Image (spheres, helix red, strand yellow):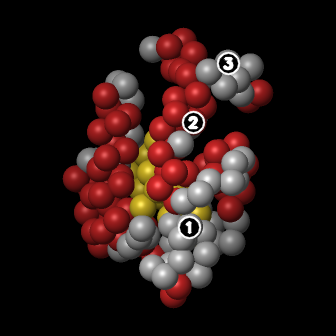
């Protein structure tokens, strides 16, 4: 799971576009699950993790290990309890080394370039509404160089 802060936390409630992007990327297939949330607290991250686990399980993917950055939300007791409840072994990246979580970081950059900043959305709600169709494209159709020009879904089907 990775996340990206858009803007100044102190002013996020007063301005449009200051939201948190919560991201889960399967290491083997690159299948991705994303939500735009208005918080990055331990509770918000734990709730996101529960939804991500369920989304991956619907596809037959069981999350056994999880790599996150060292953000306070991921060190919170509620997040640790959520990991234990799903029997997930949680590890942290080395401090100040985002490349340790390279797949998630690369996906975030792709997501920002191809979805969030591609069009001048009139509102955060419109941008968020465009996320689901983009993720369908990303997971099912978009070729990935690291997957031999196959989509994550094609890689998943080959591995199944």
Is 77 above or below relative to 50?
A: below
Residue 134 is tagged as 2
Say whether residue 124 is visible.
Answer: yes
Say whether residue 102 is visible.
Answer: no
**Callout 2: 10 Å neighbours few (<14), some, many (20+)?**
some
Name the residue at 62% across, 54% down. Answer: 121
Is 34 above or below relative to 84?
A: above
Name the residue at 35% across, 52% down. Answer: 49
Residue found farthest to the left: 85
Residue toward you, 152 or 114? 114
Q: Position of residue 54 (x, y in %)?
A: 29, 39
The local secondary structure at tag 2 comes to helix
Residue toward you, 44 or 95? 44
CA–CA distance in space, label 2 to label 1:
18 Å
The local secondary structure at tag 3 comes to loop
Residue found farthest to the front: 122
Q: Would residue 82 be found to the left or right of residue 6 on screen?
A: left
Give whichever of discs 2 and 1 has the lower sequence position. Answer: 1
- Asked if the residue at tag 1 contacts the one at tag 3, i.e. Cβ–Cβ closer than 8 Å, the answer is no
The local secondary structure at tag 1 comes to loop
For label 3, the residue is: 150
Q: Would residue 148 be found to the left or right of residue 87 on screen?
A: right
Name the residue at 64% across, 45% down. Answer: 115
Residue toward you, 149 or 62? 149
CA–CA distance in space, label 3 to label 1:
33 Å
CA–CA distance in space, label 3 to label 2:
17 Å
Name the residue at 54% across, 59% down. Answer: 123
Front tag of 3 and 2: 2
For label 1, the residue is: 17
Q: Position of residue 95 (x, y in %)?
A: 63, 72
Q: Position of residue 98 (x, y in %)?
A: 68, 62
**Callout 3: 10 Å neighbours few (<14), some, many (20+)?**
some
């Amino acid at each position: 799971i990775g996340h990206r802060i858009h803007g100044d936390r102190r002013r996020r409630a007063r301005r449009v576009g200051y939201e948190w992007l919560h991201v889960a990327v399967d290491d083997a297939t690159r299948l991705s699950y994303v939500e735009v949330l208005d918080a990055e607290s331990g509770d918000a991250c734990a709730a996101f993790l529960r939804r991500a686990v369920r989304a991956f399980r619907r596809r037959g993917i069981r999350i056994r290990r999880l790599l996150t950055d060292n953000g306070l939300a991921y060190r919170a007791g509620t997040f640790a309890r959520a990991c234990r409840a799903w029997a997930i072994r949680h590890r942290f990246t080395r401090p100040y080394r985002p490349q340790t979580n390279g797949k998630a970081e690369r996906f975030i950059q792709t997501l920002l370039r191809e979805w969030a900043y591609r069009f001048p959305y009139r509102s955060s709600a419109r941008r968020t509404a465009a996320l689901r169709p983009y993720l369908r494209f990303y997971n099912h159709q978009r070729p990935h160089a690291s997957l031999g020009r196959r989509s994550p879904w094609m890689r998943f089907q080959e591995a199944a």
